[in-house]
């Protein structure tokens, strides 16, 4: 099976041309298929997900296409563009040139944001990129860090009402007999831990 660190002959082959790399992958894939007792074509390596068997040297082409995908997000990040139409224009040119170079249509396997692409949108690539970045930004801001013995969360202001409901529920639970018993037991179990964990405080940027 494919391993980017083993066998070493595959790593050494990356400086070879596409045809030579294809032959080396073929040999390794054949040996692995015999070992597992099944044809591993299509399940041999991560780059099989972007493979097009109709192109010349499909394995090495897929490897190169797959290696290029993570670089695209950084490429767009470096432009600082936040307009879907502008991003679409840049993507169209770059995707066209890359498709010509690889000899296959990269639509759907061009960048990480292809996973959230909706081709019915006016600017599908640009919209997908912005959608992915918004999701990443939300996830980054939602990372929880522990500071000063309290749980601190840096998240967007989305639901003050929900926060109030959660706080109210927590207070109600403490006021009930069962809630008090549970709280007392939890306090005993964590007598050595002096970290107050409660409703996360929001820090807004």
Image (cartoon, rainbow, N blue to C red):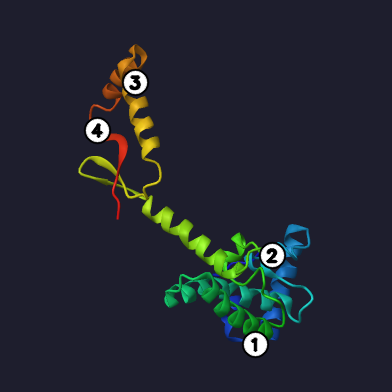
**Residue holding disc 4:** 193
- The quadrant of the picture occupied by the N terminus is bottom right
Return the x and y of residue 196 as percentages of the image width and height. 25, 34
User: Would residue 2 be seen by someone viewing this image from the given angle?
Assistant: yes
Q: Element at badge 4?
A: loop
CA distance for labels 3 and 1: 69 Å
Q: In screen coordinates, is 120 left or right of 125?
A: right
Sort mark 3 into few (<14), some (14-19) or many (20+) by Cα contacts within 10 Å: few
**Residue holding disc 1:** 17
CA distance for labels 1 and 2: 20 Å
Which sits earlier in the primary sequence, circle 1 or circle 4?
Answer: 1
Q: Element at badge 1?
A: loop
Which sits earlier in the primary sequence, circle 3 or circle 1?
Answer: 1
User: Would residue 8 be seen by someone viewing this image from the given angle?
Assistant: no
Sort mark 2 into few (<14), some (14-19) or many (20+) by Cα contacts within 10 Å: many
Q: In screen coordinates, is 163 left or right of 44?
A: left
Residue at left 30%, top 17%? Answer: 175
**Residue holding disc 2:** 44
Residue at left 63%, top 82%? Answer: 98
Q: Element at badge 2?
A: loop
């Amino acid at each position: 099976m494919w391993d980017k660190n083993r066998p070493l002959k595959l790593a050494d082959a990356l400086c070879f041309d596409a045809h030579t790399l294809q032959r080396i992958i073929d040999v390794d894939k054949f040996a692995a298929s015999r070992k597992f007792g099944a044809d591993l074509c299509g399940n041999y390596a991560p780059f099989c997900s972007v493979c097009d068997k109709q192109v010349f040297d499909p394995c090495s082409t897929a490897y190169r296409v797959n290696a290029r995908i993570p670089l695209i997000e950084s490429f767009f990040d470096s432009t600082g563009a936040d307009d879907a139409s502008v991003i679409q224009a840049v993507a169209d040119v770059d995707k066209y040139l890359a498709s010509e170079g690889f000899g296959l249509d990269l639509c759907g396997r061009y960048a990480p944001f292809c996973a959230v692409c909706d081709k019915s949108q006016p600017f599908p690539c640009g919209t997908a990129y912005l959608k992915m970045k918004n999701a990443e930004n939300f996830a980054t801001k939602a990372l929880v860090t522990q500071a000063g013995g309290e749980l601190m969360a840096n998240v967007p202001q989305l639901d003050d009402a929900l926060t109030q409901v959660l706080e109210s529920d927590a207070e109600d639970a403490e006021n009930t007999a069962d809630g008090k018993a549970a709280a007392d037991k939890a306090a005993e179990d964590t007598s050595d831990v002096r970290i107050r964990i409660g409703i996360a405080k929001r820090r807004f940027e």
